[in-house]
Image (spheres, helix red, strand yellow):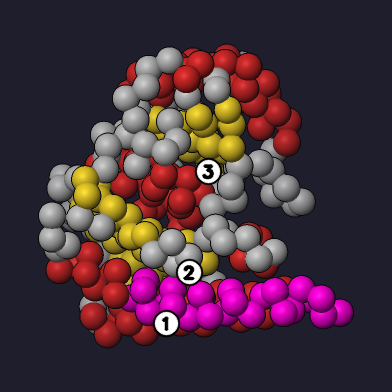
Amino acid sequence: MAMPGLIKVMERAARKAGSRLRRDFGEIEHLQVSRKGPADFVSKADQRAERTLYDELLHARPDWGFVLEEAGVIEGDPNSPRWIIDPLDGTSNFLHGIPHFAISIAVQEPKLGGGGWGDVVAAVIYQPTTDETFWAEKSRGSWLHDGRLRVSSRSNLSDSLIATGIPFQGHGDFSEWSRIFGAIGPNVAGIRRYGAASLDLAWLAAGRFDGFWESGLNDWDTAAGCLIVREAGGFVSDFRGRSQPIHSKQVLAANDTLHSRLHKLLAGALK
């Protein structure tokens, strides 16, 4: 399927920012041995990518607002959609020279009649190091370039590979995560933690992972990924099984059968 116009706008912006991130990533190995370390450099790379995305998308849709990881909320026309952007998901990977990071862009519409925000209607997740563009439009399916994506059809947990995010210094609830891991781990074929939630969700949509859970994320981490999973036939909810346009504080995603089975384990662990 040919990319719709809005997705082309998003992908063009992501590719422009991604090409700069690739160049910056190539510098990381030279900085690893410096006394100061590459942390400041990576922070600037993140900010440069965000600025590129902001400039490109503002030019394309001047009246739309933004939710940005670095710059925060920038209001636009309240009757127009807004962009939700993570310019560099997988910062720690980038910092350590691990080629697994992505740019995430979502479009969220205002609720009819005003008063808040409604559905996410378009999404792009671009992985610069593999040059893969995962995208979706509401009611039009999920795609990797021009190939249709479907979540895996596995129904047995014992055959399933599950992705997660692990709490780390100052972030997340170790006790909650440990209880969930203790319930799910013994029942599945494997658990992976790759360090970029947007790509975990994109890979779930592509059938590379069979399920995913994490908590304590932000809207920019998951807005695009939630739509891409849903449009690939998957289910996305919070830990109580409730569905919202964007899940960030709690995310559980899988195909319908595995979602039900994972949710049962997860809910039991948190009683």
Identify residue type, mark 3.
Answer: Lys
Range covered by the magenta-colored residues = 13-38
Q: What is the quadrant of residue 146 in the picture?
A: bottom left
Can residue 51 be seen here? The reply is yes
Mark 3: few, some, or many residues within 10 Å (few <14, many ≥20)?
some
User: Which labelled disc corresponds to residue 52?
Assistant: 1
Image coords of residue 124 (percent x, y): 32, 60
The question of residue 168 being in magenta is answered with: no
Q: Residue at x 58, y 74 (%)?
A: 25
Image coords of residue 171 (percent x, y): 69, 49
First reached walking from the N terminus: tag 1 or tag 3: 1
Q: Residue 49 versus residue 73: which sits nearer the camera?
A: 49
Q: Main secondary structure of the magenta part?
A: helix
The question of residue 22 being in magenta is answered with: yes
Kindly identify which residue carries mark 2: 87
Q: Mark 3 to mark 2: distance in Å? A: 20 Å
Q: Residue at x 29, y 69 (%)?
A: 11
Can residue 270 be seen here? The reply is no
Kindly identify which residue carries mark 3: 249
